[in-house]
Image: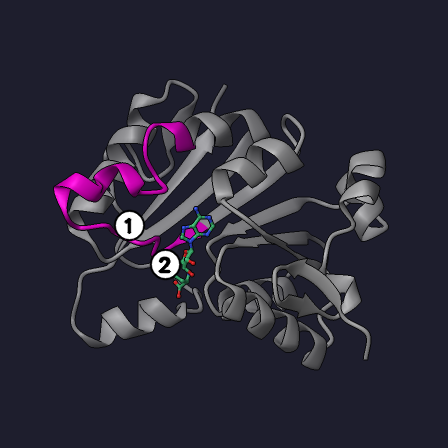
């Protein structure tokens, strides 16, 4: 089968790669061939969570952003094998991709599962969910749009809470400074299963664009 290049040495079956010229000219509706709510997962890892979400919600379109080539190939194979049509994959840094490949208010929902915690203080600046993250999400999310985050790292959970609470355009859906400890019906990600099995407390956060 023909493959499309999404990064150096990374090739996936054609429907899952994004033709950026087409996207720039016609928007995501042109890429997917329809107008549908757009959902983004950042750092999808092996992509199982994203594939499951896309399968159970055929009325929405999904874009996965990931840096890790092996994960991209895995997700593309899974989508191809399971014949899931409503997902596209973009390789790159999440903040850049969100800023450059999406228009204002274009996204309905964003998921961030178990981003790298960078536990050492001197590495905290490498964390994906710092102050710049709510800012770029706010510009890309539609009013009323949702952000879902999950982590097993207590310090990072606190940082996520602080940066979203500090942004005036988001409200915590569970209440101010409230973590969620159980999400009914959720399919755990690979890391969620791994950390759950180790007995780690998993914290979920749910914010909504309020203004
Ligand atoms: N969500 C998956 C994987 C978590 S590990 C799970 O829960 O199982 C974190 C993932 O984020 C890794 O796959 C890593 O490659 C990706 N990642 C890290 N920084 C990123 C960035 N700036 N942009 C996009 N993806 C990133």
Q: Secondary structure at mark 2?
A: loop
Residue 36: x and y in percent read: 75, 46
Figure check: 152 above or below 48? above
Q: Secondary structure at mark 1?
A: loop
179 and 151: which is toward the camera: 151
Figure check: 99 above or below 157? above
Q: Residue at x 55, y 43 (%)?
A: 109
Q: How many residues crowd mark 1 within 10 Å: few (<14), some (14–19), many (20+)?
A: some
Magenta-drawn segment: 112-133
- Side of 101 relative to 43 (left or right): right
The reply to whether discs 1 and 2 touch (Cβ–Cβ < 8 Å) is yes
Q: Residue at x 69, y 52 (%)?
A: 60
| Mark 1 to mark 2 CA distance (whole Å) | 7 Å
Residue 115: in magenta span: yes
37 and 173: which is toward the camera: 37
The quadrant where ligand 1 appears is bottom left
Residue 64: x and y in percent read: 58, 55
- Side of 26 relative to 55 (left or right): right
The residue wearing badge 1 is: 180
Figure check: 1 above or below 155? below
Residue 10: x and y in percent read: 62, 66
Figure check: 94 above or below 152? above
128 and 28: which is toward the camera: 128
The residue wearing badge 2 is: 183
Camera sees residue 35: no
Task: Look at the image and tell me in which quarter the N terminus lies.
Answer: bottom right
Residue found at the very far front of the displayed protein: 8
Q: Is mark 1 within 8 Å of ligand 1?
A: no
């Amino acid at each position: 089968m023909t493959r499309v290049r999404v990064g150096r040495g990374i090739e996936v079956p054609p429907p899952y790669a994004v033709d950026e010229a087409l996207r720039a000219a016609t928007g995501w509706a042109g890429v997917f061939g329809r107008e549908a709510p757009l959902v983004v997962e950042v750092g999808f890892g092996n992509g199982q969570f994203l594939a499951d979400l896309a399968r159970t919600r055929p009325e929405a379109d999904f874009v996965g952003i990931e840096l890790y080539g092996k994960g991209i190939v895995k997700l593309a194979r899974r989508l191809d094998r399971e014949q899931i049509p409503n997902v596209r994959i973009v390789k790159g840094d999440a903040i850049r991709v969100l800023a450059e490949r999406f228009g204002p208010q274009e996204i309905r929902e964003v998921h961030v599962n178990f981003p790298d915690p960078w536990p050492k203080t001197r590495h905290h600046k490498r964390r994906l969910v710092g102050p710049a993250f709510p800012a770029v999400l706010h510009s890309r999310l539609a009013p009323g749009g949702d952000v879902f985050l999950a982590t097993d790292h207590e310090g990072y959970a606190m940082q996520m809470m602080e940066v979203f609470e500090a942004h005036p355009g988001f409200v915590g859906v569970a209440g101010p400074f409230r973590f969620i400890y159980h999400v009914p019906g959720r399919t755990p990600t690979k890391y969620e299963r791994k950390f759950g099995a180790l007995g780690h407390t998993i914290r979920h956060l749910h914010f909504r664009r309020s203004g």
